[in-house]
Amino acid sequence: MKKRVLILYKRILLFSLMIISGGVLASYAGNGSNILTIEAEDGTINGLRIVNDDSASGGAYVDGFDSDGKNLVLTAELPADAVYQVLVRYKTYSGDKTNYIYLNGTKVADFVFKDTAEWKETIIGQFKLKKGKNTLKIASFWGWIGVDYVQFVGGTDAPVKRVDLSAEDGNTIGLDSSLILNARADTAAEYCFFVREKGGQWEKLGDYSENSGCIWLPPSIGEFEFMVWAR
């Protein structure tokens, strides 16, 4: 069993509709030895194009996802049969964009790339992958994304050491709105989310799972704190 790590809590003051940061016990570093990064421009591009851009990792990215049949295929040489967290750094062109994700030839997601004009990392999911060559394909459905790189995180027996907790879609929320929490560990992990009214008892929002996100609807006006454990 991996070591459980208590990391970070966020506070949300619903009365003033503002999210304020809580204390950080650990933060995601993003540079561990268990992270394999593959630049998009090093993959096989079908109908796409490579764009030079100093803001992209490696100085270039891939775009041109604008019609069916266009896709990017990246090959990862993984060190072990294990569960890996798969991430993509991307940007969109005007709005959320749904596109297809394949692993080793099998479609695993009709994935919604959330609207962002700036480069942003998103977690595709956690998957059990084999030692050796594995392929990831991003295929155009709605299209209109740019892809900078893909990361495979995990594949070792090392315990979780660092993790980050953040709220999606900006820093405001209304009483009738849901809050989307996203956690990210420095290796493949299971997550368990908690909430409490300030000064109260922690309440579990679900059991441990590989789902790194959690949706919470506020029960009332007040100040609440959030916490995640990863193992």
Image (tube, grey):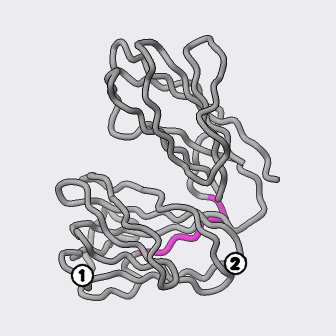
- The structure residue drawn at horizontal position 27% and vertical position 79%, both measured from the top left corner, is 50
Image mark for residue 79? 2
Q: Position of residue 181 (x, y in %)?
A: 48, 39
Judging depth in this view, the residue of 181 and 107 nearest the camera is 107
Q: Position of residue 24 (x, y in %)?
A: 59, 31
- The structure residue drawn at horizontal position 33% and vertical position 14%, both measured from the top left corner, is 16
| First to last magenta residue range | 32-39
To which quarter of the image does residue 112 belong? bottom left
Relative vertical location of residue 64 with respect to residue 9 in this rendering, above or below: below
The residue labelled by disc 1 is 49
Q: Is residue 33 magenta?
A: yes
Q: Is residue 161 magenta?
A: no
Identity, as a three-letter code, of the amino acid under mark 2: Pro
Assign a secondary structure to mark 2: loop
To which quarter of the image does residue 101 belong? bottom left
Identity, as a three-letter code, of the amino acid under mark 1: Arg
